[in-house]
Image (cartoon, rainbow, N blue to C red):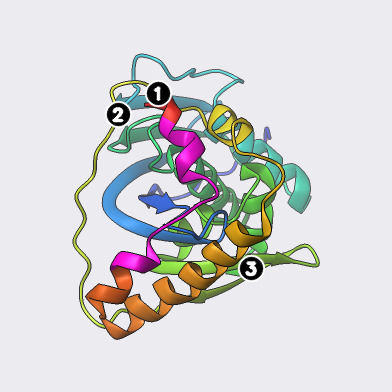
Amino acid sequence: MGLNVVFHPFMVEVPATSANLGPGFDSLGMALDIVNTVHVEPSERWEVAFAGEGMDRLPVGDRNLVLRTVETAGRRWGVQLPPARLSCTNAIPLSRGLGSSSAAIVAALVIGDRLGGTGRSDDDLLRLASELEGHPDNVTPALLGGIQTCALSDGRVVHARVPLKRPVGLALFVPDVPMPTRESRRIIPQRVEFHDAVYNISRACLLVAALASGDIDALRVGTQDMLHQPPRMRLF
């Protein structure tokens, strides 16, 4: 990444996401109206600056997730990217379950695609974003918006937008302490009892149908979970 090419400044916006919705572990997520913004300008070297959430804690050198992801995109796509200054304004809290890392990855891939002029499809972007993040349920709504159900199949992310019968309003409870994704995943049991699997499958189906139909009573049951919510309660 050392190509000296002049480009017009541009801006990328990526929303926060709430994933693992109810029983939809690693498969169901929604975009929120909390948005991170990245202003991209030509520069003599790669640099990143932050304002807002995490501005005093995020690295600005080679360890920065946005810069590392842009570099990965250029390498994977076989293009040299012109250096840029990335001015990030963060509204998404870090490590609080609102998809801050997914937002960074998606923003970086969109920036890399724009700078490299590669014209990557949404499916191409999702494939790499899911690989880097480790699961598709945050990066999919972060890139495509709305409520998305998704699954990994033969190396690609198969996704479908869930139609909403009525607007959805949310009340967010943001913890005071960080909740690193690695730790929150580590405590989930690796084996699932048969009756718990049936419990979650039935409610995942019900949740999607309830969102599409606007059935509030079904929604109450459809958000129940036995796989990831009970063990994660210990983190709080």
For residue 126, which numbered disc appears in the image? none
Local packing at callout 2 (Cα closer than 10 Å; few below 14, some 14-19, many 20+) is few
- Kindly check if marks 1 and 3 are in contact, taking CB atoms under 8 A apart as contact: no
Quadrant into which the C terminus falls: top left
| In front: label 2 or label 3 | 2
In the rendered image, which quarter is residue 186 located in? top right
Comparing 54 with 224, the one in front is 224
Q: Position of residue 142 (x, y in %)?
A: 44, 56
The residue positioned 56% from the left and 61% from the top of the image is: 27
For mark 2, what is the residue?
Answer: 175
Q: Position of residue 14 (x, y in %)?
A: 39, 51
- Hey, what amino acid is under mark 2? Pro
| In front: label 1 or label 3 | 1
In the rendered image, which quarter is residue 183 located in? top right
Which region shows up in magenta?
Answer: 220-233
- Hey, what amino acid is under mark 1? Pro
For residue 178, which numbered disc appears in the image? 1
| Residue 200 magenta-highlighted | no
| Residue 222 magenta-highlighted | yes
Mark 2 / mark 3, whichever is N-terminal: 3
- Kindly check if marks 2 and 1 are in contact, taking CB atoms under 8 A apart as contact: yes
Q: Quick check: can you spot residue 81?
A: no
The residue positioned 67% from the left and 64% from the top of the image is: 124
Q: CA gap, disc 2 to disc 3? A: 33 Å
Comparing 175 with 68, the one in front is 175
Q: Quick check: can you spot residue 174?
A: yes
Q: Which element type, helix, strand or loop, lies under badge 3? A: helix
Local packing at callout 1 (Cα closer than 10 Å; few below 14, some 14-19, many 20+) is few
For mark 3, what is the residue?
Answer: 123
- Hey, what amino acid is under mark 3? Asp
Quadrant into which the N terminus falls: top right
